[in-house]
């Protein structure tokens, strides 16, 4: 077995990360240094450049900038506030009501926007001061916001599920979207249980129950925002439009909604487009370099070597899934979601399909693992955004995060070994 190329790839990548080279450049440079071991310099450069360019030539990837744009519009369009008021009407009177509101609002906003960072920023900006005013511990509020924001990457529509579909060679996006509902909701419920127990012990105050007329008013205020989920997912499942076309519909819908709410003006459009362009550029560069690294790994037979090594340990699906989950949890600590999906899907997917795991089910397992990584230092983007919005250091948030981490891992284990939790809804709709 030849380990030279794998050793160069891993060591060079870790060296670049330790030098604080941006992750996209770290991935590209480590792929280049690995390739020149077995290929002359000039062909290595041209091959990597070609792979990076062709990796972005995909109709499915057009959905990403559109969903990012829709998320930016929603972030400014008054949707977060309306979802929070609706969530308060539902769970506000319960023990730990405002913590529940935080979780439900993050789930709804994250699902609608498809962005965990947007959910942590938008909902955290509203909920952290509100919870602090009512006597909630500031670090606990931030921890709840950070962990619940990741549910929007599992509950559709989700950009990362589209990227997994690309990396897996064409797993149905509609099936992946439908598969995310139950696992995403389970995570939200598990976080609510922990938050409820914590709030009961701390004797945090509850909201007053609202009248039916007020509940109905808040529901009607939030209904147009919630309807976006029905339009996008319903259209995809019914075959009215593809995921890419659905993303364009989402942009039009959110712009109309934001103007109806009178939360944005024509002057705001340039700022929204600029932020969308910045985010899209970062994501696309990550995709290009990650696909290039994935190709280099395939060229050097690294996935096959890893597969052989894992299957040599055991061919028991339970053992293999434990090992893969541990690896993905470790990877999520040090690597952003997009490159992790693009690099490790070609490695692990052949292994799990070989032992009878459905690719749709494995996609949900992978995303759930990496969502936990978004809440952990040193690379956790949602952790940094959540702490920044709350005005707290990471050290102060870690302690209340730990029990929330634990229940997320418990739900991950349950979903891993009960595939029907992921596959039942897609099968109901014929996927």
Image (tube, rainbow, N blue to C red):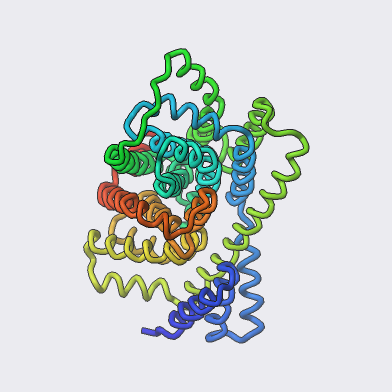
Residue 423 visible, this orientation: no
Establish if 274 lies above or below 287.
above
Q: Nearer the viewer, residue 293 or 261?
A: 261
The image quadrant that residue 249 belongs to is: top right
Quadrant containing the C terminus is top left
Residue at 55% across / 71% down in the picture? 27
Name the side, left or right, on which 383 lies relative to 179: right
What x and y, as percent, mark residue 1?
36, 84
Residue at 55% across / 77% down in the picture? 19
Residue 58 visible, this orientation: yes
Establish if 149 lies above or below 217.
below
Establish if 40 lies above or below 227.
below
Residue at 58% across / 78% down in the picture? 32
Residue at 42% across / 53% down in the picture? 371
Q: Nearer the viewer, residue 236 or 98?
A: 98
What x and y, as percent, mark residue 124?
51, 43
What x and y, as percent, mark residue 229?
51, 33
């Amino acid at each position: 077995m030849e380990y030279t190329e794998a050793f160069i790839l891993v060591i060079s990548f870790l060296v670049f990360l330790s030098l604080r080279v941006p992750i996209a450049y770290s991935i590209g440079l480590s792929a280049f240094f690995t390739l020149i071991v077995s290929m002359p310099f000039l062909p290595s450069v041209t091959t990597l450049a070609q792979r990076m360019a062709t990796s972005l030539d995909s109709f499915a990837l057009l959905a990403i900038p559109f969903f990012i744009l829709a998320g930016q519009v929603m972030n400014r369009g008054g949707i977060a506030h309306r979802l929070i008021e609706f969530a308060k009407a539902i769970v506000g009177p319960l023990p730990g009501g405002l913590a529940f509101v935080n979780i439900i609002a993050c789930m709804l906003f994250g699902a609608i926007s498809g962005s965990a960072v947007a959910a942590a920023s938008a909902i955290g900006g509203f909920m952290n001061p509100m919870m602090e005013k009512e006597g909630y511990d500031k670090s606990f509020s931030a921890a709840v916001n950070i962990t619940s924001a990741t549910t929007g990457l599992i509950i559709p529509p989700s950009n990362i599920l589209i990227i997994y579909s690309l990396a897996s060679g064409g797993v149905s996006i509609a099936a992946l979207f439908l598969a995310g509902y139950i696992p995403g909701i389970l995570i939200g419920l598990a976080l609510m249980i922990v938050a409820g127990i914590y709030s009961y012990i701390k004797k945090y105050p509850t909201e007053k129950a609202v009248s039916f007329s007020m509940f109905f008013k808040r529901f009607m205020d939030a209904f147009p925002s919630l309807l976006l989920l029905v339009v996008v997912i319903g259209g995809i499942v019914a075959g009215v439009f593809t995921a890419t076309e659905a993303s364009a519909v989402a942009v039009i819908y959110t712009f109309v909604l934001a103007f109806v709410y009178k939360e944005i003006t024509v002057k705001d459009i340039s700022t929204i487009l600029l932020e969308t362009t910045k985010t899209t550029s970062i994501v696309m560069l990550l995709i290009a370099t990650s696909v290039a690294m994935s190709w280099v790994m395939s060229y050097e037979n690294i996935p096959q070597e890893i597969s052989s090594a894992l299957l040599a340990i055991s061919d028991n699906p339970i053992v293999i899934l434990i090992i893969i989950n541990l690896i993905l949890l470790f990877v999520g600590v040090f690597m952003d979601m997009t490159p992790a999906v693009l690099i490790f899907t070609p490695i692990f997917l052949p292994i799990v399909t070989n032992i009878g795991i459905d690719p749709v089910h494995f996609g949900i397992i992978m995303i759930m693992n990496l969502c936990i990584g978004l809440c952990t230092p040193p690379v956790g983007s949602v952790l940094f955004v959540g702490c920044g919005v709350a005005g707290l250091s990471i050290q102060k948030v870690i302690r209340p995060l730990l029990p929330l981490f634990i229940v997320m891992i418990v739900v991950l284990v349950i979903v891993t070994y009960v595939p029907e939790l992921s596959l039942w809804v897609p099968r109901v709709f014929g996927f």
